[in-house]
Amino acid sequence: MSKGFDDFFERMNGKISPFIKTFESVDRILGGGLTRGSLYVIGARPSVGKSAAALSMAHKILQKNSGIRIDFFSLEMPLDQIMIRFVSKETRIHATHLRNPQAYSNSMTKEKKKKALEAYQNLSKLNLRFYTDESMKKLNNIIRTIRKRAIQDKYVAIIDHALLIDAGLAKSDKRLQIIEITRRLKMLTNELNIPIVLLTQLNRMTDKTKSIPVLADLQESASFEQDANVVMLLYREEATNQENLTLNIAKNRDGILGSIPFKLLGQYSDFDEDYNRMKGTF
């Protein structure tokens, strides 16, 4: 208790903030932002936008928190795809045109190419590292990397996504794998006093029922429910509308629950709060 008093004293007097800022509306529900010693889980069906959400969250964190560093473990997307998404978001150049500028030579003018190159160079200067090689699918390697890089109040790890991680167990039982993954990552957040954001998938039943997803819709949900401090479920309000998304804070161990409207502009890989639909929500 006496060890923690100095920290508590400085917090009471406004000298330090234990929060890492992200999206304004998410921070409001979370009570200020991402906090020390917390495991955050974001679940969604494939192709809904969870990777775009995680990349946009990383960008927001870098914009709003000085001196922060982020490690982004991308277990399903190579670096070139990630950076095309980032550049597209920054420049508002269609992602398809960036992937194949020769095929879209009429649209990809010299000015746009220059703008894209400058955006890539600027992004490469951010304190953000991507890990995309096969070795980073092993849980031990992820944990080892986080231990080397973590700094209290100045670090966030984002992992995309849980079902692709190899926990190193002899048995291939997916349930046991997830239990080991969430248990060890939660222990790591406590040990290093840092936040970790872990992405995962919702089960197929949400596609069949077309209902609002709940905690039980997480694949191997019991493990996520037990170990996560916060669980956020991302879903489309209407199957025919690719843009309108909702982020439902379905579990918040230290605060309130709530739903936040977001908009995904797929052509620019742009995921952000939908303030038009948010009126009256807060």
Image (spheres, grey):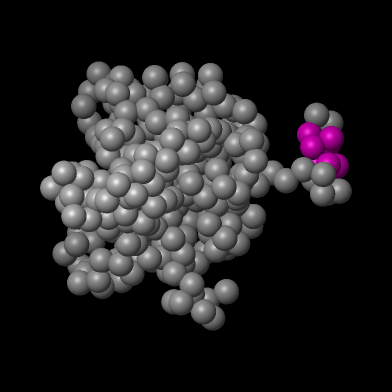
> Looking at this rendering, what residue extends furthest in the left direction?
103
Q: Is residue 37 above or below residue 93?
A: above
Q: Is residue 71 magenta?
A: no
Instruction: Give the quarter of the figure containing the N terminus.
Output: top right
Q: Does residue 278 appear in this view?
A: yes
Q: Is residue 233 above or below residue 195?
A: below
Closest to the observer, 93 or 230: 93
Q: Residue at x 53, y 19 (%)?
A: 148
Q: Is residue 49 left or right of residue 240?
A: right
Q: Residue at x 63, y 57 (%)?
A: 31
* Residue 69 image offset from top left, x and y in percent: 55, 33
Q: Quadrant of residue 243?
A: bottom left
Q: Is residue 270 left or right of residue 38?
A: left
Q: Is residue 65 left or right of residue 120?
A: right
Q: How many marks?
A: 0
Q: Is residue 77 left or right of residue 252?
A: left
Instruction: Give the quarter of the figure containing the C terminus.
Output: bottom right
* Residue 21 image offset from top left, x and y in percent: 60, 50
> Looking at this rendering, what residue extends furthest in the bottom direction?
280
Q: Quadrant of residue 250?
A: bottom left
Range drawn in magenta: 4-10
Q: Does residue 178 appear in this view?
A: no
* Residue 102 image offset from top left, x and y in percent: 16, 44
* Residue 269 image offset from top left, x and y in percent: 33, 54
Q: Is residue 5 magenta?
A: yes
Closest to the observer, 151 or 209: 151
Name the dominant secondary structure of the magenta segment. Answer: helix
Closest to the observer, 126 or 101: 101
Q: Residue at x 21, y 69 (%)?
A: 239
